[in-house]
Image (cartoon, grey):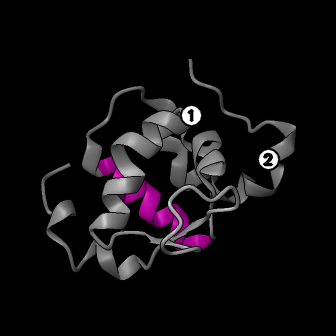
Amino acid sequence: MRKKKLPDTHLYLEYLLPIAMKARNEKRIPKTQIMRIIVELCAERELSISELSVLLLRTKGTLHTHYIGFMCDHGLLQRKFPGHQVQPKQKYVADRSVLENTDYFSSSE
């Protein structure tokens, strides 16, 4: 059983839980679904990798290695501090329009 509640330090993100719920409930889901969820979350609010980690119940290392870098390099996410990949206050933003305007999400879910 996956955790349903956020740690007390991250309660301000509670309104984003419905978007993240599929990733929180399932340990293994297709990469395109995780990327879609990350875009939806970052379209709602600028999020740090730590905040994404708490919301998605994935490690920061996994998110950075398998998702965030790729998504930034391909225009699916934007860094708040462009040119600074290793920035302690780095946050990520997205525009929902990338969900319709890219081939990364066209595969069946």
Residue under circle 1?
57
Q: Is residue 1 left or right of residue 104?
A: right
Between 78 and 36, the one nearer to me in the picture: 78
Residue under circle 2?
10
Q: Which residues are magenta?
A: 33-45
**Corner quadrant of residue 36:** bottom left
**For residue 104: magenta?**
no
Q: Quadrant of the N terminus?
A: top right
Q: How many marks?
A: 2
**Corner quadrant of residue 105:** bottom left
Determine the secondary structure under disc 1: loop
Residue name at image x 61 percent, y 45 percent: 55
Determine the secondary structure under disc 2: helix
Mark 1, Cα crowd under 10 Å, few <14 / some 14-19 / many 20+, is many
Q: Is residue 78 left or right of residue 2?
A: left
**Corner quadrant of residue 31:** top left
Residue name at image x 45 percent, y 42 percent: 63
Q: Amino acid at mark 1?
A: Leu
The answer to which of marks 1 and 2 sits earlier in the sequence is 2
Q: Is residue 55 left or right of residue 15?
A: left
Residue 10, x across and y down, in percent: 79, 47
**For residue 34: magenta?**
yes
Residue 23, x across and y down, in percent: 46, 39
Residue name at image x 70 percent, y 61 percent: 89
Residue 4, x across and y down, in percent: 66, 33
Residue extending farthest right: 8
- Distance, label 1 to label 2, CA atoms, is 13 Å
Q: Amino acid at mark 2?
A: His
